[in-house]
Amino acid sequence: MSPRHILILGGTTEARELATALTTHPGVRVTTSLAGRVSRPGAVEGEVRIGGFGGAEGLADWLRAEQVDAVVDATHPFAESITANAARAATATGVPTVVLRRPGWRPGPADRWHEVASLDEAAALLPSLGHRVFLTTGRLGLAAFAHLADLRFLVRSVDPPEPPMPPHTEVLLARGPFTVTDETALLREHRIDVLVTKDSGGAATSAKLTAARHLTLPVVVVRRPPPPAGTQAVPDVAGALERLGLSP
Ligand code: NAP
């Protein structure tokens, strides 16, 4: 009997952990798909393919050609297009699809969060909150802040960002996980007075929120886009394995 083929739509810590867990199951072939956005992706167990499929139809074709038995959409909560494509390809092919989404972050009583719906809203709010900004929303969304010439930005990303970006921008290339001690030191060293983040969730990058709380800094949090209609996401790798009918 040919092995059960599972496609993971990846690019997250959870996708990598799921690939590791699945490769221990005999009779399972696991392929992780990456968009190819970062120059040096972390190591992933099992097979890896890189690059877009060519929309929902391209993904559906790939599922048929590669005889995929199940898909796990473990992409980032803000990767809206691939998630929508995965839902459409699942409908077109009938291949069962599990959505794995790490839970979002929640503010505590001591947090000074300002929740917004988009990067544009974050940019509109910023001048009223501070002048020295720590921006951790990823290297691809800097255009929304490019007109803010009076503010100073510290931008952290895995790969170098490309213009347009604000004129007073310092770039810090780094990949999580980050510790509270290091994040606090970074905020102090750069005299940051406001932090901007997406609600990515997860432990790898949450230390900046704790550090901001300790320093009583305001935080602008971009809310997640809604999941596709009818989606019932699982919050972790164990939940995904259970949905796939496999033990952890
Ligand atoms: P996106 O806007 O949802 O996707 C844009 C296009 O990129 C998709 O239509 C698809 O092209 C291709 N694509 C995206 N993810 C893919 C994957 N895993 N495998 C193959 N093709 C993929 O995605 P994004 O926000 O640019 O994110 C790209 C990747 O980076 C995702 O895999 C995501 O998990 C990861 N990531 C994103 C963020 C974020 O903040 N958005 C943060 C960390 C990691 P085709 O239509 O040609 O198939």
Image (tube, grey):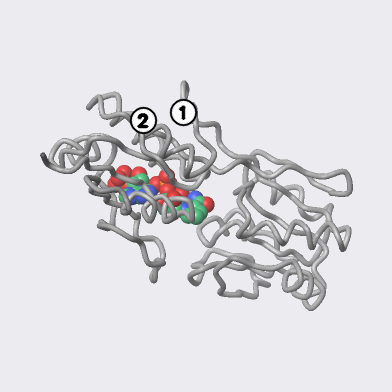
Whether residue 95 is situated above or below residue 42 in the rendered picture = above
Mark 1 surroundings within 10 Å by alpha-carbon count, few (fewer than 14), some (14 through 19), many (20 or more): some
The structure residue drawn at horizontal position 63% and vertical position 49%, both measured from the top left corner, is 198
The image's mark for residue 87 is 2
Q: Amino acid at mark 1?
A: Pro
Q: Is mark 2 within 8 Å of ligand 1?
A: no
Whole-percent x, y for residue 14 in the image: 48, 51
Question: Answer yes or no: do the residues labelled 1 and 2 have beta carbons within 8 Å?
Answer: yes
Real-space Cα separation, disc 1 to disc 2, in angstroms: 7 Å
Front residue of 87 and 180: 180
Q: Residue furthest top?
A: 230
Q: Is residue 58 left or right of residue 99?
A: left
| Callout count | 2
| Quadrant assignment, res 85 | top left
Q: Is residue 56 left or right of residue 215?
A: left
Whole-percent x, y for residue 153 in the image: 69, 68
The secondary structure type at the circle numbered 2 is helix
Q: Amino acid at mark 2?
A: Ala
Q: Earlier in the sequence, mark 1 or mark 2?
A: 2
Mark 2 surroundings within 10 Å by alpha-carbon count, few (fewer than 14), some (14 through 19), many (20 or more): many
Front residue of 54 and 187: 187
The structure residue drawn at horizontal position 47% and vertical position 26%, both measured from the top left corner, is 231
Quarter of the image for the N terminus: give it: top left
The structure residue drawn at horizontal position 48% and vertical position 70%, both measured from the top left corner, is 159
The secondary structure type at the circle numbered 1 is loop
Q: Is residue 55 left or right of residue 125?
A: left
Front residue of 236 and 217: 236
The image's mark for residue 228 is 1
The structure residue drawn at horizontal position 31% and vertical position 29%, both measured from the top left corner, is 96
